[in-house]
Image: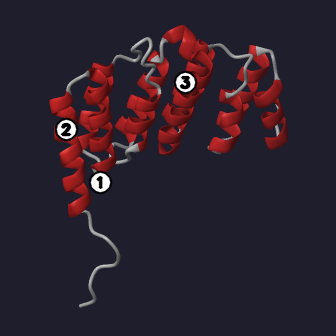
Amino acid sequence: MAELSHEELRQRFSSSRSFNDVFDAFESALRQKIDDIELYRLLFWNNALTADEITLFGEKLAKEFPHIAYDVYMWMANVFEALYASSDNFEHSLMYYQKAANVNPAVPDPYLDACDCYDPDLNIPPLTTLIDFVKSGLETVPNKKSLLQRLSYLYKLLGDDDLAEYYRLKADEASAEAPTGDPPAV
């Protein structure tokens, strides 16, 4: 069987309404060892796919190409946040932000983006879950200021003014400790 061209893959990923056509295209891309995240973004945004189908493709892609797993998980989190948040209460989004953080724990984006999912009217995802996730990032993210600021904000939302102030002060300390400009010439 002849493999699909890059353009045929793009077309099927973006506009095919048949799971079988999309699956065949995905398998063709894997056989060709195509690791172009831009191509797979089209697949993730195909609105004919269900959440389970997106999960199937994303998990397989991350396993097949570990060097793009971070990007795969971040895109999946974004898709679930935009398309499925009302039906799954951001559970999939948070799960994929956590997976992205596991792949690249020193990058603050998964922790911060997960917080952006928060819906204060419904308290979803739960503030305590977000706080725990952001705190886990303090162990691995080198520049902690943004995480400390976010923790201050989350504790403020939770109504814990003491911890909100504690993390605000920690963020201020992190700003003072951060190097600015170029290092002195020796």
Residue 173 in the figure: left or right of residue 30: left
Per the image, the residue denoted by label 2 is: 165
* Residues tagged 3 and 1 counted as in contact (Cβ below 8 A): no
* Residues tagged 2 and 1 counted as in contact (Cβ below 8 A): no
Q: Is residue 183 above or below residue 129?
A: below
Pointer 1 local density, CA inside 10 Å: few below 14, some 14–19, many at least 20: some
Image quarter of the C terminus: bottom left
The part of the image, by quadrant, that contains residue 123 is top left
Of callouts 2 and 3, which one flags the residue occurring earlier in the amino acid sequence? Answer: 3
- Residue 2 visible within the image: no
Q: Residue furthest bottom?
A: 186
Per the image, the residue denoted by label 3 is: 81
**Circle 3: residue type:** Glu
The part of the image, by quadrant, that contains residue 11 is top right
> Which residue sits at x=62%, y=20%?
83
> Which residue sits at x=61%, y=21%?
54
Per the image, the residue denoted by label 1 is: 143
Q: Is residue 51 above or below residue 180?
A: above
Q: So how many labels did they put on this image?
A: 3
